[in-house]
Image: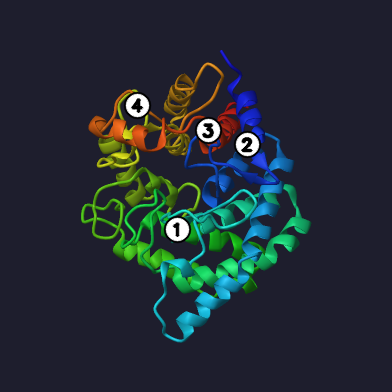
C-alpha cells in the first residue's frame, strides 16, 4: 500500500511551478491555478510541515493579483459611474501558471476563490508568525477587499462554475471567512460592518423553510459546498441548528452510504461521481462533532479510491448519479482528473487533524 501522506506531498510538489499549484496537469482543462484550490492545497501542505511550498503559493497569488490592479480600478470606476459591467471586466477564477489570464472561454466571474485565498493567507501568516509575508501580500489583500466589498451581493458562478445568475451561500461564506480573517490582522482594510452584513444576508435569505441552508437563493436543495459555512469559514458554528439540519440533508441526499459525497443531486459532470475532497470535508464535520470513528471511515474510503501509485482523483465513477452523461464528458475532455491536487491537499489536512485528536 502506498504511503499516501508521502505521495500527496510528492504529487503536489511535482505540480507546483514558481509557487503556482496546477489543479491537475494530467487533465486537459486543469493546467491552471485556481486560488480556491491553491489555498486549500497550501493549507494541507502547511499541515504536513511543507511551509516553504505554502509560502511560495501565497507569494505567487499576491504577485499575480497585483498585476491586475488596473483591472480592478477600472471596474470600480465603471461602477462609480453607474455603467454596466461586462464579463471581461471581472477578475478571473483561474490563472495561467505564469500569472497570465487564460484566453480560453471560461466561466470566470466567481468570487469564492478570492475569499478562500484571503482566509488561507491569514492562516499561514498566523501559523508561522510570518509578518514579512503579510507585509508583502498586503497590497494585494487591500486590492481584493475593495473588489469584494463592491461585488459581494452580485450573482456570480458558484464554486463549480455553474449558475451564473444566482447568489450562493457557500460563496458568501467564503467571503465572510476571508474578510473576517483579514480584519484580525489589519482591521483598517475591511469596511466596518462588511462581514456582518454578509452574514446577516445569508441568514435572512439563504435558509430554506425547514431550516437548512440552500444551494442557492431560491433553490432549497443542498450542495456539499455548504459544509463551508461552518468549516472553515465559521459563518455559523458546526453545532448551529441550521448547519446540523444541512448536514443531515447532505447525508440523506448526497452521501452514498458506505461511500463518498456527491457535489449535488442533479450533478451530471462526468456522470456525477463521488468527490474525494468533499468526502474529506464531511469527515472534518464529523470530527468536529466528536464522531471520530465515522471521520476515520470516510478517510479510509478516500484512501481506497487512490490509484496504485497513490494518486487521488477528483471523483470516482463507481456509483454515478447520471451515468448517461459520462461518455460525453470523456469524449469532450478525456478521462476525469487524476491526480487532483486539491484532493491531496484535503487529505493532508484531514489526516493532520486526525493525528492531533489521537495524540
User: Disc 2 or 4, which lies upstream in sequence?
Assistant: 2
Residue most toward the bottom? 81
Q: Are marks 2 and 1 in contact (CB under 8 Å)?
A: no
Mark 1 = which residue? 108
Depth order, front residue of 43/289: 43
Q: Residue at x 56, y 44 (%)?
A: 40
Q: Which mark is residue 317?
A: 4
Q: Earlier in the sequence, mark 3 or mark 2?
A: 2
Looking at the image, residue 120 lies above or below residue 314 = below
Q: Earlier in the sequence, mark 2 or mark 1?
A: 2
Q: Which residue is mark 3?
A: 26
The residue positioned farthest toward the top in the image shown: 1
Element carrying mark 1: loop
Residue 163 placement (x, y as % from top left) = 32, 56
Going 67% across and 49% down the picture, which residue do you hit?
124
Residue farthest toward the right in the current orientation of the protein? 132
Residue 261 shows up from this direction: no
Amino acid at each position: 500500500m502506498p504511503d499516501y501522506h508521502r505521495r500527496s506531498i510528492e504529487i503536489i510538489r511535482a505540480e507546483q511551478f514558481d509557487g503556482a499549484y496546477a489543479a491537475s496537469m494530467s487533465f486537459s482543462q486543469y493546467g491552471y491555478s485556481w486560488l480556491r484550490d491553491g489555498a486549500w492545497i497550501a493549507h494541507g501542505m502547511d499541515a504536513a510541515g511543507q511551509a516553504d511550498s505554502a509560502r511560495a503559493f501565497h507569494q505567487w497569488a499576491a504577485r499575480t493579483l497585483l498585476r491586475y490592479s488596473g483591472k480592478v480600478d477600472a471596474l470600480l470606476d465603471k461602477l462609480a459611474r453607474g455603467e454596466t459591467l461586462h464579463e471581461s471586466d471581472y477578475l478571473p477564477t483561474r490563472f495561467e501558471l505564469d500569472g497570465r489570464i487564460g484566453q480560453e472561454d471560461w466561466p470566470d466571474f466567481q468570487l469564492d476563490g478570492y475569499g478562500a485565498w484571503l482566509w488561507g493567507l491569514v492562516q499561514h501568516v498566523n501559523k508561522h508568525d510570518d509578518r514579512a509575508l503579510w507585509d508583502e501580500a498586503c497590497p494585494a489583500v487591500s486590492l481584493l477587499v475593495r473588489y469584494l466589498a463592491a461585488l459581494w451581493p452580485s450573482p456570480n458562478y458558484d464554486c463549480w462554475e455553474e449558475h451564473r445568475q444566482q447568489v450562493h451561500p457557500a460563496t458568501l461564506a467564503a467571503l465572510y471567512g476571508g474578510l473576517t480573517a483579514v480584519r484580525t490582522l489589519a482591521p483598517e482594510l475591511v469596511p466596518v460592518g462588511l462581514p456582518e452584513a454578509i452574514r446577516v444576508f445569508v441568514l435572512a435569505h439563504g435558509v430554506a423553510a425547514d431550516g437548512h441552508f440552500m444551494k442557492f437563493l431560491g433553490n432549497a436543495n443542498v450542495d456539499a459546498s455548504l459544509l463551508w459555512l461552518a468549516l472553515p469559514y465559521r459563518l455559523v458554528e458546526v453545532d448551529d441548528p441550521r448547519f446540523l439540519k444541512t448536514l443531515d440533508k447532505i447525508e440523506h441526499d448526497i452521501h452514498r452510504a458506505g461511500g463518498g459525497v456527491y457535489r449535488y443531486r442533479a450533478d451530471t459532470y462526468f456522470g456525477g461521481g463521488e468527490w474525494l475532497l468533499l468526502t474529506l470535508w464531511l469527515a472534518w464535520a464529523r470530527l468536529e462533532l466528536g464522531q471520530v470513528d465515522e471521520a476515520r471511515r470516510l478517510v479510509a474510503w478516500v484512501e481506497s479510491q487512490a490509484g496504485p501509485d497513490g494518486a487521488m482523483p477528483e471523483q470516482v465513477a463507481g456509483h454515478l448519479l447520471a451515468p448517461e452523461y459520462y461518455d460525453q464528458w470523456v469524449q469532450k475532455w478525456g478521462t476525469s482528473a487524476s491526480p487532483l491536487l486539491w484532493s491531496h491537499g484535503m487529505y493532508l489536512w484531514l489526516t493532520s487533524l486526525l493525528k492531533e485528536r489521537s495524540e
